[in-house]
Amino acid sequence: MDNKKLVETIAANLGRTTKDVDKLVDALAGILRTRCGEMDSVYIPGFGTFEPKKRNERVMVNPTTGKRMLVPPKVVLGFKVSNVLKAKLK
């Protein structure tokens, strides 16, 4: 599902306009970006936790050329599903 379909589905379920829901989704993404950029986790009750994780630098070998490369450290965003959502999906 892409962003447009997500916004349309949420708008239909809530009885709101797609413009209002688009602002809401953008605000949520902005909050996640800001808080996770500060290495803070974001917990959404009944949904899950977004958690930034630091990946250390490492040496990678290109399988086709055999050339070794250094991959720089980076921060990735992890997601842990809440038990409530996990139970509903089963």
Image (cartoon, rainbow, N blue to C red):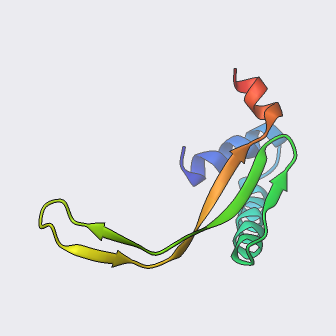
* Residue 59 point in image, percent of width and height: 34, 72
Work out which residue is located at the far left of the displayed protein and give it: 65
Q: Considering only vertical position in the picture, is 9 above or below 64? A: above
- Residue 54: name its quadrant: bottom right
Residue displayed at 77% across by 46% down = 48
Q: Quadrant of the N terminus?
A: top right
Work out which residue is located at the far top of the displayed protein and give it: 90
Residue displayed at 79% across by 43% down = 47
Q: Horizontal placement of 6 versus 41: left or right?
A: left
Residue displayed at 15% across by 67% down = 66
Q: Considering only vertical position in the picture, is 69 above or below 25? A: below
Work out which residue is located at the far right of the displayed protein and give it: 45
* Residue 74 point in image, percent of width and height: 53, 74
In the image, 25 versus 42, the foreground residue is 42
How many circles with numbers are drawn on the protein? Answer: 0
Residue displayed at 52% across by 72% down = 56
Q: Horizontal placement of 63 versus 26: left or right?
A: left
* Residue 73 point in image, percent of width and height: 50, 77
- Residue 28: name its quadrant: bottom right
Q: Quadrant of the C terminus?
A: top right
* Residue 23 point in image, percent of width and height: 75, 65
